[in-house]
Amino acid sequence: MSSLKEKISKEKLPRHVAIIMDGNGRWAKLQGKNRVYGHQNGVTSVREVTEAAAEIGLEYLTLYAWSTENWKRPKEEVDALMSLLVSTLNNEKKTLLKNNVRLRAIGDLKSLPGKLYEQLLETIHDTAHLTGLTLVLALSYSARWEMVHAVREIARQVSEGKLAPSHIDQITISNNLATAGMPDPELLIRTSGEYRISNFMLYQLAYSELYFSEKMWPDFRKEDFYEAIADFQCRERRFGKISEQIKQH
């Protein structure tokens, strides 16, 4: 059986793909289980998609793992998921090292429980030298939190006389976002049939292609990821121009 992977052009790969991993709780409910069961099974999907991204030569993969709004969920779910994240980081470190995958994280990381924060920093440190795929976990992240943080930082630079207001431009803003130094995602994937961005990378997604999958995250596998990449490669990206201008290049 052939794989969609064979249809993917290495010359037309997006540099950065971001994923809103949605549907763990509803998937678990359909199985007659609690929401944590869905999160546990979602780890398999994370492993599969990360391996798929590394195999085709993607540069950046960002996974929206936990939003600032998710802290409002029931305490037992929050505690269980935080514990799951710690064990997953610990268990998957060997796989990251084996596949030359470097880990990064964006978000209000200091708001994470101490044990998770320490495990996260340790894994980031231990994979920092790797040169393949960069896997970015968005943890305790939201775009509005990020924008407030960036505005405060830019205001501080202005107040200290390090930056003139007239010199603030799009590059200034990009350099003060959590994703500074990373290319904007060319493709955003969201699972579970929901059609919204949910406070995720609002600035960076300005020109991203959007791909929505009906599959819930625990059922999302390599072939589903390849299908999204193949779909992306069939699209015409104009950035405000017309088709004829694009074809001239």
Image (tube, rainbow, N blue to C red):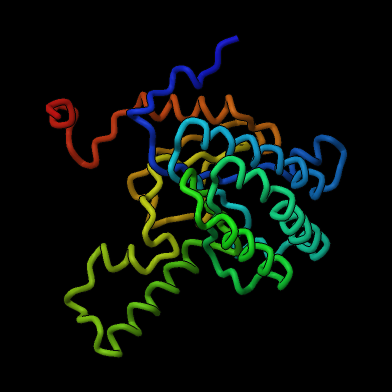
The vertical placement of 58 against 5, above or below, is below
Q: Which is more toward the observer, 216 or 172?
A: 172
Pick the quarter of the image with the N terminus. Answer: top right
Q: Which is more toward the observer, 194 or 143?
A: 143
Q: Residue at x 35, y 85 (%)?
A: 156
Q: Residue furthest bottom?
A: 160
Left or right: 214 with respect to 219? left
Q: Which is more toward the observer, 142 or 90?
A: 90
Could you tell me residue 144's position as x and y percent?
A: 47, 66
The vertical placement of 71 against 93, above or below, is below
* Number of numbered discs on residues: 0
Left or right: 8 with respect to 70? left
Could you tell me residue 95's position as x and y percent?
A: 65, 43
Q: Residue at x 47, y 17 (%)?
A: 6
Q: Which is more toward the observer, 174 or 88?
A: 88
Could you tell me residue 46's position as x and y percent?
A: 64, 41
Q: Residue furthest top?
A: 1
